């Protein structure tokens, strides 16, 4: 044994040293400070060892190294720049020690090598990858970029254009793609991985491979002349800027640093990488995106707990076909769950089947499915006009018209046809689960399962717990949502549930701005620049004015102290004039079909004339005021929902807003956005707009947090 720690060990096998990452009492290997320290000690022992002719790097876990410990590194990013710089220099020296060993080195990559795990692989001379393994640089999804030499070694190994693509998009690659660009040198069957890596190492030791030339290539300047470099880096920068709209600085910074370091040797280039890394690591975008990752981890952890209590859904049913029911049936069938789709009308059944078939066909068109897989998927949807076979269904999702009387009638009728263990879930977007439960004999088996439209695209499912809902019912639906590839957020019943309840105050801010004279098209541009995928006027048109008005009425009845409007709004005017948005060809904007048959918006003078009738003023507003008047009520309502226990954690609230509404991910959600501004600032801004009503009134808890300089998240 040349070296042994709690995270890794180095054994000697003849004239070969084997460095094995195998963290004790951990399910995965990851780079934390302890692992980095041990790797430094192991590297020193290897450098000083005699009679060693080669190094094999392996993993004792199912995955090689899954990346850095984000919680630990997130805390490290808070340190002063000079401390962070010194710490990074120490880490980079560790990888350099491995790269500079006086003998060849090979890594055997099993499972996953992500982020720092892949950078570890790049510090060795060669890489052999298991055929089912995945590698990649996910750092830009966390608002940072590879900081352990990835931006230096990757372009020198696979070319600048390939390296930019791998680093900027943050995606994982399989063995075939990794081999094609030269990120790995060989691919082997998973069971033969170590033997293949040993064979390659033996050939390097015997001189069949010029490992010293390979190393010189990796540690020298990039082989591009100035013209070539300018073309590659500037073109890539323009493309990435277009994709990110400047809201995600990490990939742009990575490209700029790669360009700056192109003519440098390794050690100089690594300093350039570190300077840029520190810059993005301290950005608000990194703080927000890292928090999102942690939020996701929390939800997955909760999901595993629910899975232990859940009953598996092997057979599902959807009540109500049409577009929504067809979308839910498609998602269930696509994920392998046989699904009955019931309606009382043949034409609705046809519409539901058409909706499902459309999504399967798109999967074939994009190469994700073949025709056989599409046929198998469609065969899992069994249309029916009766309750035959409902006696062995595990879960029923009700997706009929949004009317409490109709829903109660359908749910009560269905309860009579299913087993005592069957879970009934309503896809309602706003009707009280406790109210619907009054129609049932087994309310403990009933809850809400709110999908967002379009079902196949929107990742969120709100799981709404009623007062009588059992833990088993919640667990079963959470587990089923995971099975469907969705992210479930468990919330308690209240008007509008979590997401729509928090969205309405945002729209209230929008309507108040219009009433005060703001141009809705300008508001859209400001909020899209803020990061929303579409502004509030355009979103209203897409959702449908009548749908928005219905939710508004539910929320006004539920929270009359702050959500009941005393005057006619622009939304009301649009509904009165049958301008319901895209579905009627006009709303705030006018819509005509483009060449692909998609609605294309344009300005409509008639909309402005109608809006003038409800405007009490003619003010123009600066972008900052537009953002504040729209976002502050959203933050405050999110705080109210959290304080009332509608959601258990701020993590789940923010994830719900991002996945259900398209809240800008780089801002992290309402709570993370509030933390970034500081709650004292939020409260001061709210007080400035107190005249606009109770929606702008911070809670007492918010004011206490502001006084005590508290935040909703640790990493703020």
Image: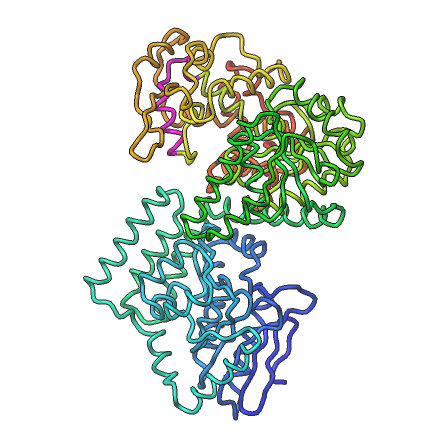
Q: Position of residue 441 (x, y in %)?
A: 80, 27
Q: Position of residue 374 (x, y in %)?
A: 50, 48
**Residue 624 is drawn in which quadrant?**
top left
**Residue 583 is drawn in which quadrant?**
top left
* Residue in view at x 52 percent, y 81 percent: 56
As for residue 519 lying within the magenta part, the answer is: yes
How many numbered callouts?
0
Q: Residue furthest left?
A: 227
Q: Is residue 339 above or below residue 620?
A: below
User: Front-most of 508 and 362?
Assistant: 362
Residues in magenta, as a range: 513-529
User: Front-most of 367 and 711?
Assistant: 367
Q: Position of residue 101 (x, y in %)?
A: 46, 82
User: Chief secondary structure of the magenta span?
Assistant: helix
Is residue 580 rendered to the left or right of residue 469?
Answer: left
User: Front-most of 703 and 10?
Assistant: 10
As for residue 481 lying within the magenta part, the answer is: no
Quarter in which the N terminus is drawn = bottom right
Can see residue 710?
no
Can see residue 65?
yes
* Residue in view at x 41 percent, y 65 percent: 177
């Amino acid at each position: 044994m040349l070296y042994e720690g709690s995270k890794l060990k180095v054994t000697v096998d003849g004239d070969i040293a084997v460095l094995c990452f195998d963290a004790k009492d951990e399910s995965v290997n990851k780079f934390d400070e302890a692992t980095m320290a041990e790797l430094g000690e192991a590297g020193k022992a290897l450098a000083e060892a005699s009679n060693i002719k080669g190094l094999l790097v392996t993993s004792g876990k199912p995955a090689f190294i899954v990346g850095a410990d984000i919680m630990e590194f997130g805390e490290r990013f808070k340190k002063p720049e000079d401390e962070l710089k010194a710490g990074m220099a120490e880490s980079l020296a560790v990888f350099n020690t491995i790269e500079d060993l006086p003998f060849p080195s090979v890594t055997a990559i099993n499972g996953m090598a992500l982020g720092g795990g892949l950078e570890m692989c790049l510090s060795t001379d060669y890489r052999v990858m298991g055929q089912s393994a995945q590698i990649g640089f996910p750092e830009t999804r966390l608002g940072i970029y590879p900081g352990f030499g990835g931006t230096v070694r990757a372009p020198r190994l696979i070319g600048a254009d390939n390296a930019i693509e791998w680093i900027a998009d943050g995606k994982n690659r399989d063995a075939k793609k990794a081999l094609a660009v030269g990120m790995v040198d060989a691919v082997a069957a998973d069971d033969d991985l170590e033997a293949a890596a040993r064979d390659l190492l033996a050939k390097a030791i015997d001189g069949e491979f010029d490992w010293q030339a390979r190393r010189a290539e990796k540690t020298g300047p990039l082989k591009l002349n100035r013209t070539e470099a300018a073309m590659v880096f500037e073109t890539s920068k323009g493309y990435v800027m277009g994709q990110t709209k400047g809201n995600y600085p990490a990939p742009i910074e990575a490209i700029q640093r790669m360009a700056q370091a192109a003519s440098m040797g390794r050690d100089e280039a690594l300093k350039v990488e570190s300077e840029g890394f520190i810059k993005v690591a301290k950005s608000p975008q990194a703080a927000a995106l890292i928090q999102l990752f942690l939020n996701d981890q929390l939800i997955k952890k909760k999901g595993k707990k629910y899975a232990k209590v859940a009953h598996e859904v092997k057979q599902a049913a959807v009540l109500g076909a049409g577009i929504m029911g067809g979308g839910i049936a498609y998602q269930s069938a696509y994920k392998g769950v046989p699904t009955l789709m019931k309606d009382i009308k043949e034409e609705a059944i046809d519409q539901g089947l058409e909706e499902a078939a459309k999504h399967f066909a798109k999967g074939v068109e994009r190469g994700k499915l073949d025709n056989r897989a599409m046929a198998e998927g469609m065969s899992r949807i069994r249309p029916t006009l009766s309750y035959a076979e409902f006696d062995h269904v595990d879960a029923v999702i009700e997706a009929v018209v949004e009317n409490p009387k109709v829903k109660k009638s359908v749910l009560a009728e269905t309860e009579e046809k299913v087993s005592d263990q069957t879970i009934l879930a309503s896809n309602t977007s706003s009707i009280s689960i406790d109210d619907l439960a009054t129609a049932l004999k087994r309310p403990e088996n009933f809850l809400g399962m709110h999908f967002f439209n379009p079902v196949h695209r929107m990742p969120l499912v709100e799981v709404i717990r009623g007062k009588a809902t059992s833990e088993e019912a919640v667990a079963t639906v959470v587990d089923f949502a995971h099975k469907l590839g969705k992210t479930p957020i468990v919330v308690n019943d209240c008007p509008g549930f979590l997401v729509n309840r928090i969205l309405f105050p945002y729209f209230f801010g929008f309507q108040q701005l219009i009433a005060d004279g703001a141009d809705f098209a300008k508001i859209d541009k400001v909020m899209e620049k803020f990061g929303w995928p579409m502004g509030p006027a355009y979103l209203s048109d897409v959702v449908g004015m009548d749908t928005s008005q219905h939710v508004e009425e539910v929320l006004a009845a539920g929270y009359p102290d702050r959500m009941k409007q005393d005057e006619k709004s622009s939304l009301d005017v649009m509904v009165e004039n049958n301008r319901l948005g895209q579905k009627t060809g006009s709303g705030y904007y006018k819509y005509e079909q483009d060449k692909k048959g998609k609605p294309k918006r344009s300005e409509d003078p008639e909309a402005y004339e109608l809006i003038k009738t409800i405007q009490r003023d003619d003010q123009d507003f600066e972008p900052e005021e537009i953002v504040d008047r729209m976002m502050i009520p959203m933050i405050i309502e999110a705080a109210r929902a959290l304080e009332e226990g509608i959601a258990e954690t701020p993590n789940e609230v923010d994830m719900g807003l991002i996945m259900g509404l398209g809240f800008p991910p780089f801002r992290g959600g309402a709570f993370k956005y509030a933390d970034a501004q500081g709650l004292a600032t939020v409260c001061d801004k709210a007080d400035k707009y107190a005249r606009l009503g109770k929606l702008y009134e911070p809670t007492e808890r918010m004011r206490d947090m502001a006084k005590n300089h508290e935040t909703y998240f640790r990493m703020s």
